[in-house]
Amino acid sequence: IVGLIAGAAPHRFMITIRALMDVQYLAQSPKPDDNLLASIDRSLALFHDNKDVIITLGARMGAKRVIDNWHIPKLELMQSITTSTCQVGALMQWSADTTEHAHVSEIKDPAQRTNNNDYNPQI
C-alpha cells in the first residue's frame, strides 16, 4: 500500500500508513526480542502522533460516509502488542505462520502431485 500511494498522498499521511504497516509486519516476528518490541512501540507512537491526518483528509471511510473516530478493535488490540508479547511470546493473531503452513500442506503440496488438469478430484 505504501508503494501505491507514494507521491500521491501528503507526507504525514504516508508516515502514518507506513508506521501502521511497520507495526503489522514487525508483530509477525516468530522470535521477538527487546529491540523489535521497542521498534513496535516507536511505530505505534509515530502512528498515534500523526493519525489525525487520516481523518482530516477524509480518508477514514465507512460504507456511506467519513468516519470521524478511531473506535477500531484491532487498533485497540495494538496498544497491548508489546506487553502481551513479553508475557506470552509471539501473538498468533499477528502471525501468518499457522495459516501459511496449512495452505502449503493442504493445498500446495497436494496440487504439485497432480498433472495440473482438473486437479481438485486428484487432491
Image: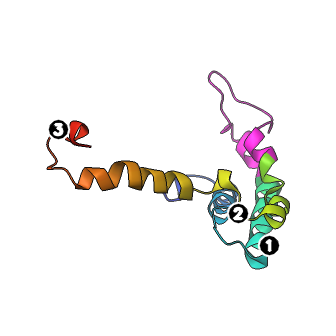
* The magenta stretch spans residue 32: no
Q: Position of residue 10 (x, y in %)?
A: 64, 54
Residue 41 figure quarter: bottom right
Disc 1 is placed on an element classified as helix
The colouring scheme, among rainbow, by chain, secondary structure or one colour, is: rainbow
What residue is rendered at 74% in x and 76% in y?
A: 33
* The magenta stretch spans residue 65: yes
Q: Which residues are magenta?
A: 51-76
48 left or right of 31 in image: right
Disc 3 is placed on an element classified as loop
Of 39 and 108, which appears nearest the observer?
A: 108
Residue 120 figure quarter: top left
Note whether 19 is above or below 93 in the view shown: below
**Would you name the residue on which mark 2 appears?**
90
65 left or right of 123 in image: right
Of 28 and 7, which appears nearest the observer?
A: 28
Q: Residues within 10 Å of mark 2 (few under 14, many from 20)?
A: many
Note whether 19 is above or below 54 in the view shown: below
Of 24 and 116, which appears nearest the observer?
A: 116
**Would you name the residue on which mark 1 appears?**
38
Q: Residue type at mark 1?
A: Ala
Asked whether the residues under the numbered discs 2 and 3 touch, taking CB atoms below 8 Å apart as contact, a structural biologist would say no
Q: Residue type at mark 3?
A: Asp
What residue is rendered at 80% in x and 72% in y?
A: 38
The Cα–Cα distance between marks 2 and 1, rounded to whole angstroms, is 14 Å
What residue is rendered at 64% in x and 60% in y?
A: 18
Q: Residues within 10 Å of mark 1 (few under 14, many from 20)?
A: few
Q: Position of residue 63 (x, y in %)?
A: 62, 24
